[in-house]
Image (cartoon, rainbow, N blue to C red):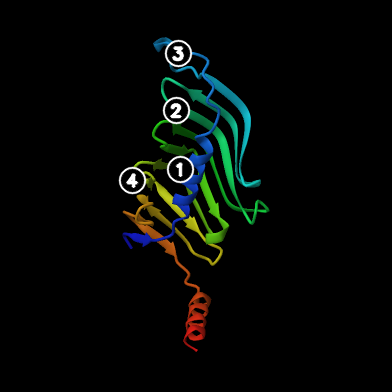
Amino acid sequence: MDKFFGNKKFLIAHCSLLIALLLPACSFDYGSASSSDKNLPDIVMDNVEYVRIRSLDPQARLQAERVERYEERGIMALRNFSFEQFGNHGEEVNAYGRAGSASFEINSGDIRMENGVRLEVDSEDIAIETVWLEWKDKDRTLTGGEKEEVRIFQESGTSFTGIGFQANARTRSWAFSDTVSGTYVHDDEDDEEKEDATDDEEV
């Protein structure tokens, strides 16, 4: 099999959430850096924890070992970070992600996650692992390296690896452009539930 296409939108939703977490992060300005020190961070924060709350319910939590903000370059660098998305009024963790490092472009909203990326979404029963992923906010796309492997797992037994991962938020689809191998397990119980629901509607 050379290509694989799907319509799951978990990656898009949770990358958008990660951007929403990063945008309001500290915006203190201690003065303009000169060209000689633009590679030095304007703000350095260690052991950061940020919780996003809406209507008194926690929506998500971001943790990072280190955050560096570069005003002139317009980026934030994160090291050893993770994030959680909560469901059921903050009582359950619905999604989880982590990466060894990330670079976030403040103005564009683009983010590149590297050094061991893992995303898990309980509601979709799916986990994804790869070396790096890049989100382009304007295009609403999420991509992996053209030659990098992306591994996807499900509790049902589905487990496969593909190369050239691409996802598009506008079309709510994702695909691999190159070699895919592994096992896809189809759950017949889902079909039976759909048939039962259809029968009930017709009665």
Residue that protrudes farthest toward the bottom in the picture: 203
What residue sits 35% from the left and 53% below the top? 170
Q: Give how far apart the Cα atoms at labels 1 and 4 are.
A: 12 Å
Tell me the amino acid under the disc marked 1: Val
**Residue corresponding to mark 1:** 131
Looking at the image, is mark 4 or mark 2 nearer the viewer?
2
Name the residue beneath numbered marker 4.
Answer: 146
Residue at mark 2: 75
Residue designated by label 3 = 33
Mark 4 closeness class: few <14, some 14–19, many ≥20 residues within 10 Å: few
Q: Is residue 155 above or below residue 52?
A: below
Report the Cα–Cα distance between label 3 and label 2.
14 Å
Disc 1 residue crowd, few under 14, some 14–19, many 20+, Cα 10 Å: some
Nearer the viewer's eye, disc 3 or disc 1?
Answer: 3
Q: Amino acid at mark 3?
A: Ala
Q: Residue 71: x percent and y percent?
A: 45, 21
Label total for image: 4
Residue 196 percent coordinates (x, y): 52, 83
Given the current orientation, which residue lies at the most extreme right position?
A: 91
Amino acid type indicated by mark 4: Glu
Residue 1 coordinates in the image, percent (x, y): 33, 63
Which residue type does callout 2 highlight? Ile
